Image: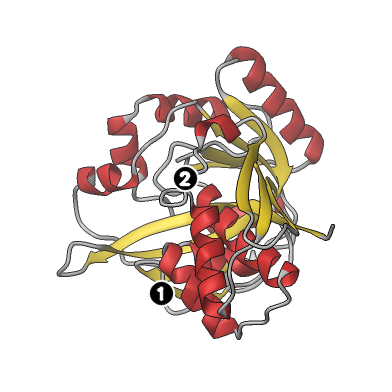
Amino acid sequence: MTEVVRAAPAKLNLTLEVVGRRADGYHLLDSLVAFTEYGDTVKAATAEAGEFGLTLAGDFGPFLIADAFDNLVLKAARLLAEEAGIKPAAQLTLTKRLPVASGIGGGSSDAAATLLALAALWQVSPAPEDLARIALKLGADVPVCLATRTARLEGIGERISPAPAVPPAPIVLVNPGVGLATPKVFQAREGAFSPGAGPAGVLSASPADATALADALRPYGNDLTPPAIGLMPVIGQVLERLEATEDCLLARMSGSGATCFALFPTDAAAEAAASAIRAAEPRWWAVATRLKAA
């Protein structure tokens, strides 16, 4: 039996500004995204001809369903098989370590990892632009998850451009155990649009460490934080808790929530903060990890 395993790391919106709105109602964004060393994994194993299935594992596996019409992993597999002109045959295992519907791109990253794992297992080599086209059919966030590199997202998320690499900064991720539907957050947003980061983007060069990264991010924010807190006040409590931890450099919400993150100067400080939050709020999910460097 041949097995291929691919990582599906958490995707963080280090900044997220809403800069406009299209005629069809979709909001236009300017966002700096990065990935963490912590996340889900997708394993693809050979199977007998015609056999095709998905096993869900991990702490958050029970929160998903292995339904061919709703599960992004299975959708990704079927789209790749169609592109390659083959019948899908594989046994997939998704180990789900990231909370569901939490603003850190878990589903999108899982779909991207599935495309990469099955392309290797089935020994098919779609051109990068074809793989990106398949990924976009699965969701606006899936293409950027193929490379898992720091990038700038514009438009509705479909315009991806390279950004300077981030350092392997210690970081804490916290989710209060609630899911938040992205459309509701955008609908609740009020006020003027933000100007965006300008032609140069948020980062003009790679920050040397977590402190330099926090300094570069500080002028920019996440425009979806106020409406998200309005819908789920506990998100505000998470941010307050993170900001109050010792050595916290910067705390933000990712995406449309409800997961928040904080940068720390050392791994020890991040581990201590995550441990303290888990002890104080046992129903919250809190992990210490690092940003994924280039």
Q: Estimate the x, y position of residue 73 in percent, counting from the top left.
A: 55, 54
Label 2 SS: loop
Q: Estimate the x, y position of residue 151 in percent, counting from the top left.
A: 56, 69
The correct choice, above or below, for 232 with respect to 161 in the image is above
Q: Is residue 281 visible?
A: yes
Q: Residue furthest right?
A: 1
Question: Would you say 193 lies left or right of 49 here?
Answer: left
User: Relative to the observer, which residue lies in front, 58 or 98?
Assistant: 58
* Figure quadrant of residue 119: bottom right
* Figure quadrant of residue 170: top right
| Rendered residue at 63%/27% (across/down) | 245
To which residue does mark 1 refer? 198
Q: Which mark is residue 67?
A: 2
**Quadrant position of the C terminus in the picture:** bottom right
The correct choice, above or below, for 277 with respect to 163 in the image is above
Instruction: Bin the neighbour count of mark 1 within 10 Å (Cα to Cα): few under 14, some 14-19, many 20 and up.
Output: few
Label 1 SS: loop
Question: Which amino acid, by three-letter code, is at mark 2?
Answer: Asp
Question: How was this image coloured?
Answer: secondary structure
Instruction: Bin the neighbour count of mark 2 within 10 Å (Cα to Cα): few under 14, some 14-19, many 20 and up.
Output: few
How many numbered discs sit on the rendered protein? 2
